Image (tube, grey):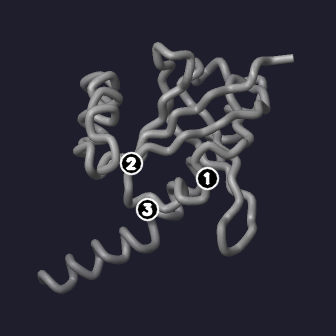
Amino acid sequence: MRVIRLGLARWMVVTVIPAVFRRVNAATAWVVRSRLHPLLRGSVLVVRCEGRRTGRTYLVPVTCRPAGSGALHALTSVRALWWRNVASGAPATVYYRGREREARIDVVRGVDDPPEVERALASRGVVARTLVALPASESVLLRVWLSPEM
């Protein structure tokens, strides 16, 4: 019986969960780029990045919060591989509140600057901290500096 449960759990992790997240991410990215973006109240940012090896363009929705310095802070897990495609400090394209914007993204790993990532985690609120439930060493902070709108 234990073998069956382990096999079922492995199948869920390898097959079902990635398929669900692909569809949810695609739907979220579509909403952020459409006229329906007020439904998300500016809490989601879509980062457009190219794969390092494949060269394919990916749209990755990330929850974000305004930071006091005029930047947006987005948190992700170190285990998520997509953030490695974002070159720190390089120009990037993001979608925020229904608009395509040029931005500069600084990537801060929790192991590189634990206090800053801890502050970002603490500002997430109780529900988000429970959902994310990551220590600073397992987190990556993306500081997104949007270019001024024309």
Residue reaching furthest to the right: 150
- Circle 1: element type: loop
Q: State the image coordinates of residue 70 (x, y, percent, origin top left).
A: 56, 16
The reply to whether discs 1 and 2 touch (Cβ–Cβ < 8 Å) is no
Q: How many numbered marks appear?
A: 3
Between disc 3 and disc 1, the foreground one is 1
Nearest the camera: 63 or 145?
A: 145
Q: Image height check: is 92 above or below 64?
A: below
Left or right side of 94 for 118: left
Image quarter of the C terminus: top right
Between disc 2 and disc 3, the foreground one is 2
Left or right side of 52 for 102: right
Amino acid type, residue under disc 3 in the picture: Ile
Lower position in the chain sequence, tag 2 or tag 3: 3
Amino acid type, residue under disc 2 in the picture: Arg
Which residue lies under the disc numbered 3? 17
Amino acid type, residue under disc 1 in the picture: Ala
The CA distance from mark 3 to mark 1 is 28 Å
Residue reaching furthest to the top: 68
Picture residue at 64% right of the left edge, 39% below the top: 46
Image quarter of the N terminus: bottom left
Nearest the camera: 80 or 1?
A: 80
The crowd level at tag 3 (other Cα within 10 Å; few <14, some 14-19, many 20+) is: few
Which residue lies under the disc numbered 2? 109
The crowd level at tag 1 (other Cα within 10 Å; few <14, some 14-19, many 20+) is: some
Lower position in the chain sequence, tag 3 or tag 1: 3
Which label was assigned to residue 87?
1
Q: State the image coordinates of residue 120 (x, y, percent, origin top left).
A: 35, 29
